[in-house]
């Protein structure tokens, strides 16, 4: 029986919203395998150039409970640092992710992630995905702090 599950994640960062968005969203297919190969082994665009309608294929690492996933960009506003995409993977019929990065007064940002998933194993798998997402956002922050000219 398929179930629907949701979670939210809010992460503060010392990195500005535009830099974090470019690294975490716009270039994640190339950055993730470098920073978190245990989460994303490799990735590439199947269709599109990164904008709305782009479909990406991700081979997953040992830290996530599925082997591969397909990600489609449904909404993208680079200026507002917002996006929505859907993911399909083993055991999850569909998973919708909304990501917004807002600037903070100190020059940093807050990433707000909302995920809703439906599928036979959606609850267990998406809770693991939540842990992986938090780890990935922190890895990107550390990378951007160590490389102040990246994604400017």
Image (cartoon, rainbow, N blue to C red):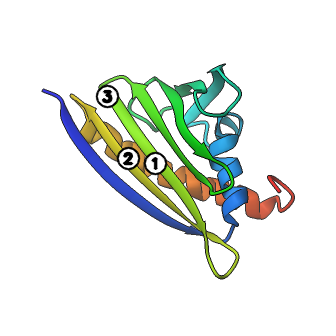
Q: Nearer the viewer, residue 64 or 7?
A: 7
- Judged by depth in the image, the label closer to the viewer, 3 or 1, is 1
Q: Residue at x 12, y 26 (%)?
A: 1
Going from N to C along the chain, the mark reached first, 3 or 2, is 3
Residue furthest out toward the bottom:
105
Left or right, 79 with respect to 120, comes to: right
Left or right, 64 with respect to 27, comes to: left
SS category of the residue bearing label 2: strand
Do the numbered discs 1 and 2 sit on residues whose CB atoms are within 8 Å?
yes
Residue wearing tag 2 = 115
Q: Is residue 23 above or below residue 68?
A: below
Q: Residue at x 65, y 23 (%)?
A: 45
Quarter of the C terminus within the rendering: bottom right
- Judged by depth in the image, the label closer to the viewer, 3 or 2, is 2
Mark 3 Cα within 10 Å, few/some/many (few <14, many 20+)?
A: many
Q: Residue at x 71, y 35 (%)?
A: 30
Mark 2 Cα within 10 Å, few/some/many (few <14, many 20+)?
A: many
- Judged by depth in the image, the label closer to the viewer, 1 or 2, is 1
Q: Residue at x 54, y 40 (%)?
A: 75
Residue wearing tag 3 = 92
SS category of the residue bearing label 1: strand
Residue 108 location, x and y as percent? 66, 72
Q: CA distance from mark 3 to mark 2?
A: 12 Å
Q: Nearer the viewer, residue 105 or 33?
A: 105
Going from N to C along the chain, the mark reached first, 1 or 2, is 1
Q: CA distance from mark 3 to mark 1?
A: 17 Å
Residue 27 location, x and y as percent? 70, 40
SS category of the residue bearing label 3: strand
């Amino acid at each position: 029986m398929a179930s629907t599950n949701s979670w939210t994640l809010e992460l503060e960062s010392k990195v500005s919203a535009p830099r974090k968005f470019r690294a975490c969203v716009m270039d994640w297919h190339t950055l993730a395998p470098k920073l978190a190969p245990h989460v994303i082994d490799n990735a590439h665009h199947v269709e599109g150039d990164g904008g709305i309608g782009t479909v990406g294929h991700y081979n997953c690492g040992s830290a996530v409970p599925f082997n591969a996933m397909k990600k489609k960009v449904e909404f993208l506003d680079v200026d507002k640092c917002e996006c929505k995409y859907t993911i399909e993977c083993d055991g999850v019929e569909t998973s919708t992710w909304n990501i917004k990065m807002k600037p903070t007064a100190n020059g940093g940002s807050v990433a707000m992630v909302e995920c809703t998933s439906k599928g036979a194993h959606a609850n267990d798998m998406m809770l693991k995905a939540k842990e992986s997402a938090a780890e990935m956002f922190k890895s990107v922050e550390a990378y951007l702090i160590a490389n102040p000219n990246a994604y400017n």
